[in-house]
Image (tube, helix red, strand yellow):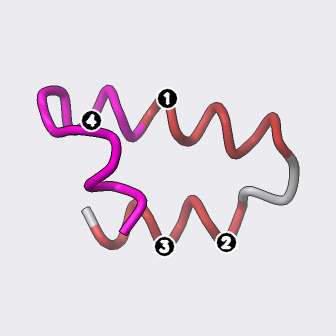
Amino acid sequence: MRFIKYACRRVALSANLHHVCSRATDAAVGAQPKSALLL
């Protein structure tokens, strides 16, 4: 999961990419609360 967060931050150079990455991460973790991903 940390790798996904790291990779997302590295490539999220725009709001669109960040949004897409956030959605993809949410889908990957499923039931985990979004706040946990922002730490």
Question: Quick check: 4 left or right of 20?
Answer: left
Q: Is residue 7 magenta?
A: no
Q: Residue at x 53, y 67 (%)?
A: 7
**Image location (x, y in percent) of residue 17:** 75, 42
Depicted 24 relative to depicted 1: above or below: above
- Secondary structure beneath dot 3 equals helix
Task: Read off the residue under disc 3.
Answer: 6
Label 4 vs 1, first from the N-terminus: 1
Image x and y of residue 33, in percent: 22, 38
Callout 4 amino acid: Ala
For the residues labelled 4 and 3, say whether their Cβ atoms are less than 8 Å apart: no
Which residue is farthest front?
A: 35
Q: Nearer the viewer, residue 38 or 14?
A: 38
Q: CA distance from mark 2 to mark 4?
A: 18 Å
Residue 30 among those drawn in magenta? yes
Q: Earlier in the sequence, mark 2 or mark 4?
A: 2
Give residue 23's mark.
1
Crowding near the residue tagged with mark 3, few <14, some 14–19, many ≥20 C-alpha atoms within 10 Å: few
Q: Please provide the residue range marked out in magenta.
A: 25-39
Q: Disc 2 designates what residue?
A: 10
Residue on which the image places disc 4: 28
Report helix, strand or loop for mark 4.
Answer: helix
